[in-house]
Image (spheres, rainbow, N blue to C red):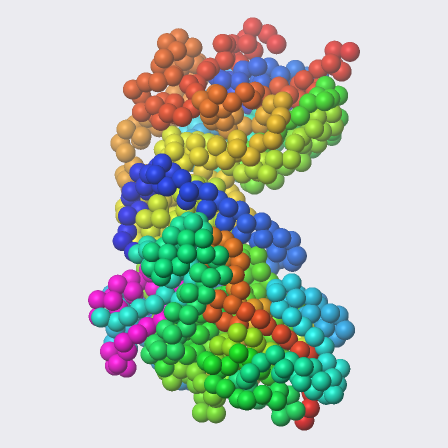
Amino acid sequence: MRDPILRRIHRALEHRPRLELPPPLTLPSPSPEEALRLFQERLGSNGGETLYLPDLDAARAWLAQLAQGYSGVALGHQLPEALRPDLPQLPPEEAPLGVSWALGAVAETGTVILSSADGRRAQLLPPTHVVFVPQERLYGTLLEALTALRDALPAALGLHSGPSKSADIGQIMVRGVHGPGRLIAAVVAAPPG
Amino acid sequence: MQLKANQYPRESARVLREEPQVRDSVTAATLNFDAKRRQMYGEIEAETWRGWAEAVKNHVLTHLDTYLPQAEAALQSNGVQVHWAENAEAAQRIVAEIARANGVKKVVKAKTMVSEELGINPLLESLGLEVLETDLGEYIIQLLGQPPSHIVGPAIHLNLEQIRELFHRKFGTPLEAPPEDLAGVARKLLREGFLQAEMGISGGNFLVAETGTLALIENEGNIRLSTSAPRIHVALVGIEKLLPRFSDLSVFLSLTARAATGQRLGTFVSLIQGPRRPHEPDGPEAVHVVLVDNGRSSVLADTEAWETLRCVRCAACLNACPVYRQTGGHAYGYVYSGPIGAILAPGLVGLENTKPLPYASSLCGACFQACPVRIPIPKLLLTWRNRAVEQGLQPKAEGAAIRAYAAAMTRPWAYTLGSKALRMLPKEALDNTVLPVVKAWTEGRAGLKPSPKSFRELWKEGI
Amino acid sequence: MRVALFVTCLTDQFFAEAGVAAVRLLRSLGCEVEFPEGQTCCGQPAYNAGYWNEARQMATHTLEVFNEAEYVVLPSGSCTTMVRAFYPELYRDTPQRFTQAEALSHKTFELAEFIVKVLGVTQLGEGLRGQHIAYHHGCHALRELGIKNEPLTLLKNAGAEVVNWEAAQECCGFGGLFSVKLPEVALSMADRKLQTLPKVDYLTSADGGCMLHLAGRIENRKLKLPVKPLASVLWEAHAHQAEG
C-alpha cells in the first residue's frame, strides 16, 4: 500500500512548484510578571481556577485546607513529596481528587502541560484536578513552551486549558463531561527539591 | 455514511419543510460559533496567522513525498506501528485485523470524521464488536442512528427537547431533566466504556513529521481518555494532515481552536509520541497510525482543487455559511458538509456523484473570510461548476438557455428586442407560468415587475 | 470627468428610475455622463453557473463597449465585482484580453464607491434627515471588493439613521441562478434577513438581484416594507440641495 500511494503523490507533484517553508511565527513574549497575570486571567476565563503559592509553607497550608474536602487522592508519579496532600491514595477511577505535577504552563493560552510520565489517569478520571506548576516553567507563549519541550518528549503530553466541557446538548454549556469538571492550577514560586 | 449528495436539492427542501427546528437549532449554534471565532480572530494578527498557516500547508502539500516517509520513520522510532490505506476498504481491513489480532471486543471512539468517511463503525459492528462513540454529540447521534451534521458539533441540528426525549426513551430520565443530568447519564455509561474497552480509535488533527507527534484537539476529555485508557490506540490520519516541525503546532493548534470554537486552545490537546514507555504509570501498549489516502492523492494531483487539502476541519466555513445554516449537514448527503464539503466531495468521490454540492452556495464569500488556511472556497466552487458544465453534467435545457441568453447579450439589437418583449408579455407570464425558471421564482416570491420603461428608453427620451 | 454608466441589465429592466437617479446624481456632482448603448449584461449569471465560455463572450462584448471609457460606474455591487474581479480571471489564458480586462478593472467602480473614493465627496446633502434605513450589503461588493463604509457614509452624512441590523452583512439568498435552482433554501435565507430586520422606513441596497429577491419575498409575505435602490436614495439625499 505504501509504495503505490507514495508513487501517486510523487507523480502528482512532479512538475509542480515546490513551495517554501516560512520560518516559525513568533509572538512577543510577556515578562515573567505579565506571564503570571496572563496565565491566571486566561485559564480563569476558560473556567479554570488558579492560585499563586509564594513558598513551600504557603503550599503546605493550602494543601492541608484542600485535603479537608476530600476522602482520597490519586497522585501524579512525579509530584514532589512535599506537595502530596495528607489523604489516602486511591486508584484514579475511584479518587475524588487528582493531583499532578506539570511539565510547564503557557500564559498565552492559559494552559498547563502534563506528561504521561506523571500518569494520565490521575489527570483525567477524578472530578477535581489540581495541578502544581513550577513558576520557572511558566512560558509566555505556546511556541516557547513547545520549543523547550521538543527534545525530551514523553509518550504523550496533555495540554489542559480548563475544565472538561461540552455544549452538545442543545448548545448549553455543561462541565465535567468526561474529564475533570474542576481544574485548579497552583503556580509554585520555589518548587521543593 | 451512504453517499446521497445528488439528492441535495430535494433533501434541502424536505428538511426545510418537514424539520423546521433544524434550521433554528443550526442557525443559533453556528451564529454563536461564528461570533466567537470573530472575537478570537480579533485578538490576534489574523491575516498574518492565516497567511503563515496557508504557506506552511502549501509547503507540506508540495513536499508530501518527502514528509510522509519522514513522518513514518519518526513514528516508527517512537514505537508506533504505521499502516497505509489506499482507500476505505483497505483502512477497514487494517482496523479489522488490528482488532482481531488483539482480541478486541469493545471499542471506544474519539470523535473522528475520517472514520465516518471510511465507514469504520459499520465495519466493526459487522464483526460483532461493541462500538461506543464517546464525544457527547457523537454519542447522541449514535443513539439516534444518524451521521454527524457538522464537522465539530455533530448534533447541533438537535434541540434540547429532542435530546431530552431521546434520553427519556433510552434511559428513563425525566422529560424535564437539565442538560447536566443528561450529560451525567452519558458520562457514567461512557466511563465504563473507557475502562472496559480494549481499543480506542481516534482521528488526528495534525501529524508532525519531525517528531512523529499526533495532535488531537477536543473539549470534553474523551479523546484523551480514548487514547490513554484502552490497551490499543488506533489513529486514522489523512495524509494531508502533516506539519513539518513540532513548533508549527503552536500556531496550528491555536488557530484551529480560534476558528472552530472561538477558543485560544481546545480545552484538551493530546500530543502523542507513541505507546506507554517503561517507566510511565499508564497508557496504551500499542499505538497504530493508519495513513489514509482515499482520494487525497488525486486531489493533490488536481492543479486547482489541491488547495482544498489545506483544510484543518475546523468547520469555520460551515458556521459562516448562510446556506448551511438553513438545513444543517444531513441534506448534503456526504460526510463533509457545508462549503468545504461541497469542494471536497467532488474531489474525493467524483463530481458525477456529488454534482449539486458545488451549486449549494450563493457564493457570498463568508466561508473564505472565515477559513484559517485561506482556502479559496468560492473560487473552487466555481471551478467545480465549470467542470460540471464542461463535462456535460448539467441539464441540457439549462445549457441551451444560457447559450441563447449569451447570444442575445452579445447582440445589442437582440437585447433591445428582448427588453421590448418583456414589457409586452401578459402580466401572468411573470406571475406564474409554465416556464420552470419563472415558476421557481414565483413560488414564494411575488412576480417580477419590469419598470414601465427601460432605462435605455428613458435615456433616449432624455434625462 | 467622463463617466460611462454601465447601468446593468437588472437596473435597465427593473429599476430604470435608479439608472436615471444615478445619471442625475453624477451630473450634479460635475461628471459628464455617457451611456454606451451597445451595453447589455456583464455575464455574471453565466459565470456563476459555470458557463465560462458564454460568460467570456459577454465579457468580451462588454470590454469592447467600454474600451474608450475614462471611468465606468455601475449602480450594482455584484456587476462591479464581475467586471473588476472576475473578468481578468476569465482571460487567464489570453494575455491580450487579460490586459484589456485589467485595464477595465482598474477604471470600474460601484456608484457609492466612485462618489467617495474618486470624486472625494462624502456629503451629498441632507435629504435623508429623519429617515430610518436598513442597508443590505451585497455579498460581492462587501467581501470581494471590500466596499462597506462608502454607502453607509453617504447615507449617514445625509441625515439618515442606518439601523443596526444583525443580518445586514449576511447573504439574502439571491445568488443569481441559486435563487431558482434551490428556491426553498434561497427563500429561507431571505426570511432570516427579514425576520431580523428592525422597524425601518425602507430597505436599500446597491444590488438589483438582492432587491428583486427580497422585495418579491416581502410582497409574497404581505410585509409592508418598501425597497429602494441605493442610487435613488442617494439622489434623494442630494436632490433638494441640487435644486436649491
Q: Is B371 in front, or is B210?
A: B371
Decide whether residue C12 is among the magenta residues.
no
Q: Can residue B248 be seen in this view?
A: no
Residue C121 in the image: state x and y as whole percent.
74, 27
Furthest residue toward top: B461
Q: Is residue A188 depicted above or below B148 in this figure?
A: below
* Residue at 34% in and 39% down: B18
Quadrant in which the C terminus of chain B appears:
top right
Count numbered badges in the picture.
Answer: 0
Q: Look at the image and give the residue range highlighted in magenta.
A: B99-127
Q: Can residue A47 be seen in this view?
A: yes
Residue B310 in the image: state x and y as whole percent.
46, 59
Q: Is residue C217 depicted above or below B246 in this figure?
A: above
On screen, residue C42 versus residue B293, left or right, reads right
Q: Is residue A94 depicted above or below B381 in this figure?
A: below
Residue B409 in the image: state x and y as whole percent.
42, 22
Q: Is C21 in front, or is B168?
A: B168
Q: Is B261 in front, or is C229?
A: B261
Residue A66 in the image: state x and y as whole percent.
64, 80
Residue B395 occupies quadrant: top left
Quadrant in which the N terminus of chain B appears:
bottom left
